[in-house]
Image (cartoon, helix red, strand yellow):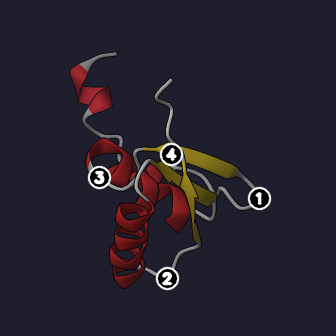
C-alpha cells in the first residue's frame, strides 16, 4: 500500500460495529489495550482476555474513564 494512502487511515474511518463481538487477548496493556477502545467506541462488545483478573479490571476502569463503553473481563491463561 502506498504511504500516502496508509497515512490517511485512522480509527475514525472504521464502520459501526454494533452487534459485533471482539475478543482482545492482552487487552489490559500495550497493543491490546490500544486496540480495545476503538472497537468499543464503534459499538462492538469487547471481551478483554488476559491472565490477571486484577489487571483486566484496572484496564476496564481506566478505559471507562475515557469513554462510556461496554467491556467484559475474561481470565485467560494459555500456558500449557
The Cα–Cα distance between marks 3 and 4, rounded to whole angstroms, is 11 Å
Residue 28 vs residue 72: left or right?
Answer: left
Q: Earlier in the sequence, mark 1 or mark 4?
A: 1
Decide which of tag 3 and tag 2 comes sooner along the chain.
3
Q: Is residue 10 above or below residue 41?
A: above
Quadrant into which the N terminus falls: top left
Q: Residue at x 44, y 55 (%)?
A: 36
Residue 40 in the figure: left or right of residue 66: right
| Quadrant of the image occupied by residue 3 | top left
**Residue 10 placement (x, y as % from top left):** 35, 47
Disc 3 to disc 1, C-alpha distance: 25 Å
What residue do we see at 28% from left, 17% from top? Answer: 2
Q: Which mark is residue 64?
A: none
Q: Gap between marks 3 and 2, in whole Å? A: 19 Å
CB within 8 Å, label 3 to label 2: no
| Mark 4 vs mark 2: in front | 4
Helix, strand, or loop for circle 2? loop
First-in-chain label (2 vs 1): 1
Instruction: In this rendered view, identify the residue nearer to me: 55 or 46.
Output: 55
Nearest to N terminus: mark 3 or mark 1: 1
Q: Residue furthest right?
A: 19
Q: How packed is label 4: few (under 14 Cα within 10 Å), some, or many (20 or more)?
A: some
Q: Which residue is mark 2?
A: 68
Image coordinates of residue 27 in percent, x first then y, are 41, 51
Mark 1 Cα-neighbour bin, 10 Å: few <14, some 14–19, many ≥20: few
Q: Which residue is mark 4?
A: 24
Q: Nearer the viewer, mark 3 or mark 1?
A: 3
Find the distance from the CA under tag 1 to the CA under tag 4: 16 Å
Residue occupied by mark 1: 19
Amino acid at each position: 500500500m502506498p504511504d500516502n494512502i496508509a497515512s490517511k487511515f485512522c480509527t475514525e474511518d472504521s464502520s459501526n460495529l454494533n452487534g459485533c463481538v471482539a475478543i482482545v487477548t492482552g487487552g489490559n496493556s500495550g497493543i491490546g489495550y490500544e486496540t480495545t477502545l476503538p472497537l468499543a467506541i464503534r459499538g462492538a462488545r469487547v471481551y478483554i482476555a488476559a491472565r490477571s483478573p486484577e489487571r483486566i479490571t484496572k484496564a476496564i476502569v481506566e478505559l471507562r474513564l475515557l469513554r462510556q463503553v461496554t467491556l467484559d473481563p475474561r481470565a485467560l491463561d494459555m500456558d500449557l
